[in-house]
Image: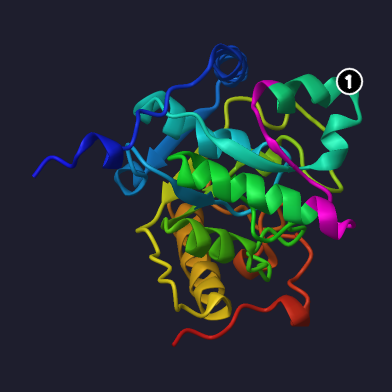
């Protein structure tokens, strides 16, 4: 049955500034010859709101995660980004063109405003991208997550779509400067998982634990099928797989499976 007009979700079309930014990003990805393989896009809704989460291993993982959503679904995304990106002329225009939502973690009022803006976008049928870990993982494993993604999904009445990517940290990440040479023509794996529904009475802490577990599984799969494998001692490979990345701190160890 076709819903009445008032209940229909309008198409989510990218504005001209977002299209320009997307074109530039795609051109850069082609220029450095990244081989991006995206799986699981059927889990991302073609219309309507959803919180899309991603694991945080690099400064550009958000780009490769949004890549498939834009190229194959034609949908723009709104990203929650650290407010200091608006302070530099190098990044200010990027977050403005992306219509990102600034987040200032040190100020409660700013956090509330960012949260409200994200919920409003979700209710309006937009895709909002959130990195629940909040900071880049130096171990390249999934860190503990904040509950913000679960809370905004619950309030807006939309699902969470978990995702994980692998490979973009070889270009630039915390503790490693930008290097085009070491990241030239590398493979990038991106995967989206089944949506996590967040009911009105759901425990957001429990939902966040499920989200972390799902993200960990998605990341492990991306690492398993990665064309370049996991060279022993490589700086970009986690210690769990024989690499030289810093080990996971005891406090950040993932919870055991149920």
Please state, as top left, top right, bottom left or bottom right, where the N terminus lies in the image: top left
Which portion, as a residue range, is magenta?
97-110
The structure residue drawn at horizontal position 35% and vertical position 28%, both measured from the top left corner, is 11
Q: Residues within 10 Å of mark 1 (few under 14, many from 20)?
A: few
Tell me residue 257's x, y (percent): 47, 84
Q: Magenta stretch: residue 61 in it?
A: no
Side (left or right) of 53 relative to 234: left
Please state, as top left, top right, bottom left or bottom right, where the C terminus lies in the image: bottom left
Whether residue 226 is visible, yes or no, is: no
Side (left or right) of 160 relative to 53: left
Total numbered badges shown on the rendered structure = 1
Q: Quadrant of the rendered structure where residue 193 is?
A: bottom left
The structure residue drawn at horizontal position 46% and vertical position 40%, both measured from the top left corner, is 124
Q: Secondary structure at mark 1?
A: helix
Tell me residue 73's x, y (percent): 36, 30
Tell me residue 59's x, y (percent): 73, 40
Tell me residue 201's x, y (percent): 45, 78
The structure residue drawn at horizontal position 65% and vertical position 68%, both measured from the top left corner, is 145
Q: Quadrant of the rendered structure where residue 129 is?
A: top right
Q: Nearer the viewer, residue 47 or 243?
A: 47
Side (left or right) of 120 relative to 82: left
Report which residue position mark 1 lands on: 89
Q: Magenta stretch: residue 102 in it?
A: yes
């Amino acid at each position: 049955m076709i819903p009445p007009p008032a209940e229909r979700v309008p198409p989510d079309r990218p504005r001209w500034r977002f299209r320009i930014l997307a074109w530039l990003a795609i051109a850069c990805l082609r220029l450095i010859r990244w081989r991006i393989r995206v799986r699981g896009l059927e889990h991302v809704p073609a219309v309507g709101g959803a919180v899309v989460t991603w694991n945080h291993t690099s400064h550009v993982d958000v780009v490769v995660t949004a890549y498939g959503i834009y190229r194959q679904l034609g949908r723009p995304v709104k990203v929650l980004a650290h407010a200091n990106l608006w302070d530099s002329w190098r990044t200010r225009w990027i977050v403005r063109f992306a219509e990102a939502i600034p987040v200032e973690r040190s100020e409660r009022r700013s956090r509330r405003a960012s949260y409200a803006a994200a919920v409003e976008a979700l209710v309006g049928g937009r895709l909002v991208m959130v990195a629940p870990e909040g900071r880049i993982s130096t171990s390249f494993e999934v860190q503990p997550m904040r509950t913000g993604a679960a809370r905004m999904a619950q309030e807006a009445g939309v699902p969470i779509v978990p995702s994980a990517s692998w490979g973009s940290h070889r270009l630039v990440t915390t503790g490693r400067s930008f290097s085009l040479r070491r990241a030239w023509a590398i493979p990038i794996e991106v995967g989206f998982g089944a949506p996590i529904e967040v009911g009105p009475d759901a425990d957001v802490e429990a939902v966040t634990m499920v989200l972390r577990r799902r993200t960990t599984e998605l990341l492990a799969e991306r690492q398993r099928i990665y064309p370049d494998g996991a060279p022993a001692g490589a700086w970009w490979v986690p210690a769990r797989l024989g690499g030289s990345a810093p080990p996971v701190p005891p406090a950040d160890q993932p919870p055991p499976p149920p």
